Every structure is written in C-alpha cells, then in structure tokens.
Amino acid sequence: MKIYRNTNLKNQHCKGVLAIGNFDGIHLGHQKVIRDAKQQANKNKLPFGIMTFEPMPVMFFNKKIKNHRINSLDQKINQFKKLKIDFLIIRKFNKKFSRLTAEKFIEKIIFKKTKCKYLYVSNNFRFGFKRKGNIRILKKFGKKFNYRNLIVKPFKKKNNVISSTLIRKKIKEGKIKEANKLLNRNWSVDGKVIKGQKRGRKIGFPTCNLKMGNYVIPRLGVYAVKVKTSDFNKNGVANVGYRPTFNGQNLLLETNIFGINRNLYNKVISVSFKKFIRPEKKFKNFDYLKKQIKFDIKKAKNV
C-alpha cells in the first residue's frame, strides 16, 4: 500500500476507483464500502485507493472537541493495510483546504489530481466550503469531470444503521461487546507507557499507564483486556478513570498485564477492550481496593 501525504499521485494510481471519507473506526459499514469499491476495481482492472482527512474535520473546526476518535491515524493506516488497498491519501485538513468550494474540490482534487473513474462515498457524505457539497452535487458534476459516483447504502445490523457515532455512544456507555461487534474486532487504545505514582506496584498489582489522548473516553471503570506489544500478546485487567481512592486528578488507562512483571516505560502497547467488568468507585482504604482488584482479576481471567 502506497501512502500519499498529498494528492500528487503516481500515474499507476490515477484513473482508478477512489473511496472518500473519515473512516473513523473502519467499522462494518466502512468495510462494506471498501469491499464494494474493491470489487469494482478488480472487475475493471483498476487501482483502488482511499482518501481520508487529518485532522478529522470536526476536530479541526471545533478545537474544544478532544476525545472523539475511535482509532488513531496509525491504527487507521494498519487497518487499511489489512484490507489490502493499493494506495491511501491522507489529505491534510487545514484552513486553505476547508475553504475549497464543493465544485472546486471536485475539479481540483477529484478530476485534476486523482482522475478517478469511480467514486465511492456514503449517502451522508458532506464536503467543500461550509459542507455544502453532497451526493446530489457529486452526481451533477460526474459527467463534466469524467467520473461515475456510486453511493453505498447504509449498512444495518438489527435495524440500526452502523455509524461511527453509534460506536462512540456504545463505547461511552461501556457497551464494549456491542461496539466490538460493530467494528468486527476489539476496540483498542495504543500509546506509550508513561511513569505513574507506582501505587499499583506497592500494593502488588503493577500497571502500565497510558494517556487517552484524542480517543473517545469509555465508561469509567474496569475492563477485561488483551495487551499486545512487539514481543508479547497477553490478557490483563484495566481501569479507565481518575483513581478516586488516591484522589487522582488526571484521567489514565492503567493496565495490569497477566504474567508480565517488568519495566515497560516508553514502550508502545496496544490495549484492546474485551468486556466491561464494573464502574470505577472509591474505596475506604487500600485493603478494600486490594480485595476488589483480586476479584476483578479473577473475573477478567474468565472472559
């Protein structure tokens, strides 16, 4: 998979099939769009690629939105690699780009840069200055700019349209198993292990601590998880929260990895969420907390 940080494509990736969107989460709905577009490319022996935007437009326009992403850019890139697309365009979303009108976006980017023959978007796709572009406008200019616009119908599961918004809601509610089904994989948080207060180690349960960054914040509490690094893949138990027993101020993801008791500071780990165990709560003292952690570990090991 060739990655472009601009829209200056090599000839081998022009005049192909292109899918455009944020693809946050790359959930079952996104996977359907990608599958359909890929079939079209294979049928016509054309290259197939995806254009996505960084930062996500909603976060660019509203700087107050911090915890929004289902997956990081690196996770997104890895997911696209697994789906075996030919190329990926990561278009920087900035002030200048946001001022392109819908027609100019079609002319300058789709027509002059990608020269795509088939364009795939979701039915609620919006683009261009003030989000005035939609599928009606894409269809209107299709003949003029030599592309065929194909809209994939919303993908439903149990009569619910699968969307990034729905998955964020499930994660925030702690309905992690439901979110995982819609993603077709376990939702995960990747990050570099930071130094904590070493309180977990003092009470016999050392943890690896991660900041949540721009990830959507799941329901605060304890989860059964799986932790993956470059050299191991282990089960564990994690707490997302503020550590009220210790009067903590900063939100952290703290993970106790089963069978691992070594220093992982500055190591990049991936924590994938399997099941919500219980909400975060404040304990009277360390003894009560230790007793509860033992119970949480037992529960997590049975997931």
Image: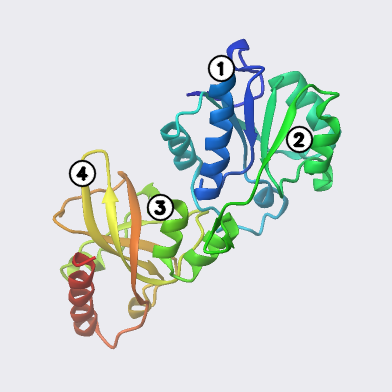
Q: Residue at x 63, y 29 (%)?
A: 18
Left or right, 194 with reference to 56:
left
CA gap between label 4 and label 1 equals 40 Å
Q: Amino acid at mark 3?
A: Val
Left or right, 117 with reference to 102:
left
Q: Does residue 11 lie above or below 144 as drawn?
A: above
Residue 101, quarter of the rendered image: top right
Q: Does residue 200 lie above or below 189 as drawn?
A: below
Closer-to-camera residue (196/240):
240
Instruction: State the count of labels.
Output: 4
Q: Residue at x 29, y 59 (%)?
A: 225
Q: Residue at x 69, y 31 (%)?
A: 119
Do the CB atoms of the residues marked 4 and 3 lie less than 8 Å apart? no
Do the CB atoms of the residues marked 1 and 2 lie less than 8 Å apart? no
Q: Residue at x 49, y 40 (%)?
A: 76
Q: Amino acid at mark 1?
A: Lys
Q: Amino acid at mark 4?
A: Phe
CA gap between label 1 and label 2 equals 31 Å
Label 1 belongs to which residue? Answer: 45
Q: Viewer-nearest of labels 3 and 1?
A: 1
Q: Earlier in the sequence, mark 4 or mark 2?
A: 2
Q: Earlier in the sequence, mark 3 or mark 1?
A: 1
CA gap between label 4 and label 2 equals 42 Å
Disc 3 packing (10 Å; few <14; some 14–19; many ≥20): many
Label 3 belongs to which residue? Answer: 189
Label 4 belongs to which residue? Answer: 232
Q: Amino acid at mark 2?
A: Phe
